[in-house]
């Protein structure tokens, strides 16, 4: 069998002195025709390979270049060099794949993140992106583990859908109709009856509505899959294709929802801190070096690991939207006109407002509740006893340092008559949503749920400042490479 290899991470953890092993990986550096730094992606740490002088011919030595892939058999020995506990004394070296050193774009030097985005198909091989995507994997695993331990059912909701869960209309259309000669109705509109599904369909913006159907049978479900927004936003916080985690829980109110979301975030961060300590230490150091380049007044008060510990060990601050607006109005930033966007009751808070609350005022994650009904989706439960002109809904957003909104959720409107009135006010077509309304007709219950943007969570845990650096292949306006 070809693949009888030991991963470098396992060797560095167990340090089996005198063991005969075979390793395979890619060359990071090769010096003095004797010392190879080999990496196989299982860890950021390299294994030093010591090649006895004279063992390899000149033709082989020339082919051991940065990026080349090797299969090496030998004996593990205690290392006398600094920064490593063991090394592999090579007895056989086989080159699996050559790499032209002059053409290979990843040289043993520091590359900018902008440059690495241009070669996203190769950036996994760098220390930074190796670390980021191992942490992304760990977070995904922890998410499934969290919900499985609590008896949630993992529900696969459709990617192609005929409904718009957000009512925003920023959707990618799915069609097999030709661009030229599109069939038309008498009034000039597109005749979708000739399309594949016989109606207008789109890529999903959320699995929530279908998730509610599952919650009405299983009590607790969650979805974890790709979602799509045709938003022309060229920012460090937005993607056209991203992943969402959306639990839905029957027999739950807004407070239950907040409690679960807070527990969930703390759980998955703890999992990474326990299982990816080396990766986090690397990113912590990387972030500290970046902070040194900033003006003193722009530097973060906490390091990455310190920030994660703070989130895990402290309760999130909980305030109402009305209280949040008052804090902003009373803030020095507002009084000195430092906010780009206006502050008043009824606004949809911008990222600068959210980050002020989190980073300047409370200095920890904040849960904001009870938003104005006019800026929230039709399915959110109307609060009783509101002031005239200040109708609110039982919504909640979790705001995180460095990012802003990371979770959005609500108690859902379970009262059929209230939901119908809200849909009418927001021009949501009732006939097309009859399947959804059946959950309120047949055994309705108080229920709630939230959505967590996975990439924003990965950003928060890794300290990466651009969302395009935490997804393997970013989909953004005018960009769909690979």
Image: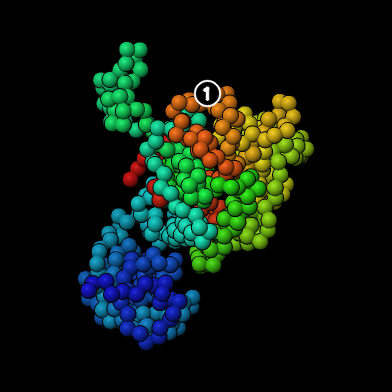
Q: Is residue 128 visible?
A: no
Question: In the figure, is residue 317 to the left or right of 432?
Answer: right
Outermost residue to the top: 186
- Foreground: 101 or 331? 331
Q: Quadrant of residue 326?
A: top right
In this rendering, position of residue 322 left or right of residue 205: right
Task: Return the residue found at the far front.
Answer: 442
Q: Nearer the viewer, residue 448 or 91?
A: 448
Image location (x, y in percent) of residue 139: 49, 58
Residue 104 x %, y %: 32, 56
Vertical position of residue 430 compared to residue 299: above or below: above
Instruction: Measuring from the top left, give residue 63's x and y in whole percent.
Output: 26, 67
At 63% from the left and 60% from the top, the residue drawn is 312
**Is the residue 88 above or below the residue 164 in the image?**
below
Image location of residue 213, percent across then percent down:
47, 42
Quarter placement of the N terminus:
bottom left
| Residue under the point 48% across and 26% down | 430
75 versus 250 height, above or below: below
The colouring scheme, among rainbow, by chain, secondary structure or one colour, is rainbow
Q: Residues within 10 Å of mark 1 (few under 14, many from 20)?
A: few
| Side (left or right) of 472 relative to 82 | left
- Say which element carries label 1: loop
Residue found 57% across the figure and 63% down from its top:
270
Q: Which residue is mark 1?
A: 427
Count of labels in the image: 1
**Residue ID at (71%, 41%):** 320
């Amino acid at each position: 069998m070809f693949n009888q290899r030991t991963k470098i991470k396992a060797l560095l953890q167990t340090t089996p002195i005198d063991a005969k092993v075979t390793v395979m990986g890619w060359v990071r550096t090769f010096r003095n025709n004797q010392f190879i730094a080999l990496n196989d992606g299982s860890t950021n740490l390299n294994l030093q390979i010591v090649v006895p002088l004279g063992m390899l011919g000149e033709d082989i030595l020339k082919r051991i270049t940065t990026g080349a892939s090797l299969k090496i058999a030998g004996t593990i020995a205690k290392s006398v060099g600094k920064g490593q506990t063991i090394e592999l004394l090579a007895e056989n070296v086989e080159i699996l794949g050559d790499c032209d050193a002059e053409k290979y774009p990843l040289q043993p030097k520091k590359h900018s993140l902008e440059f690495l985005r241009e070669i996203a198909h190769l950036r996994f091989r760098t220390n930074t992106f190796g670390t980021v995507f191992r942490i992304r994997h760990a977070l995904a695993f922890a998410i499934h583990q969290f919900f499985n331990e609590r008896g949630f059912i993992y529900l696969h909701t459709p990617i192609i859908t005929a409904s718009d869960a957000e009512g925003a209309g920023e959707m990618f259309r799915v069609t097999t109709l030709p661009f030229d000669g599109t069939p038309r109705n008498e009034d000039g509109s597109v005749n979708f009856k000739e399309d594949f599904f016989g109606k207008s369909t789109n890529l999903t913006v959320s699995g929530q509505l279908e998730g509610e159907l599952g919650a009405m049978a299983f009590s607790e479900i969650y979805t974890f899959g790709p979602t799509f927004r045709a938003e022309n936003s060229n920012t460090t916080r937005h993607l056209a294709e991203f992943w969402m985690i959306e639990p839905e829980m029957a027999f739950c109110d807004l407070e239950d929802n907040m409690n679960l979301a807070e527990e969930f975030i703390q759980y998955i961060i703890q999992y990474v801190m326990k299982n990816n300590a080396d990766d986090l230490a690397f990113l912590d150091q990387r972030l500290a070096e970046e902070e040194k380049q900033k003006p003193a007044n722009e530097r973060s008060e906490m390091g990455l690991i310190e920030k994660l510990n703070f989130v895990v060990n402290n309760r999130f601050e909980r305030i109402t939207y009305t209280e949040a607006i008052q804090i902003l109005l009373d803030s020095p930033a507002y009084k000195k006109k430092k906010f780009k966007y206006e502050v008043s009751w009824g606004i949809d808070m911008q990222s600068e407002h959210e980050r002020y609350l989190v980073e300047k005022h409370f200095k920890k994650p904040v849960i904001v509740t009870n938003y104005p009904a006019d800026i929230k989706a039709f399915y959110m439960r109307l609060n009783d006893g509101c002031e005239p002109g200040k109708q609110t809904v039982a919504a909640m957003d979790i705001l995180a340092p460095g990012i802003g909104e990371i979770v959005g959720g609500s108690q859902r409107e379970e009262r059929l008559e209230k939901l119908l009135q809200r849909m009418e006010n927001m021009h949501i077509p009732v006939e097309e949503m009859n399947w959804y309304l059946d959950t309120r007709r047949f055994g309705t219950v108080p229920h709630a749920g939230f959505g967590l943007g996975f990439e924003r969570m990965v950003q928060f845990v890794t300290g990466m400042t651009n969302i395009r650096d935490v997804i393997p292949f970013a989909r953004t306006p005018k960009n769909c490479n690979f």
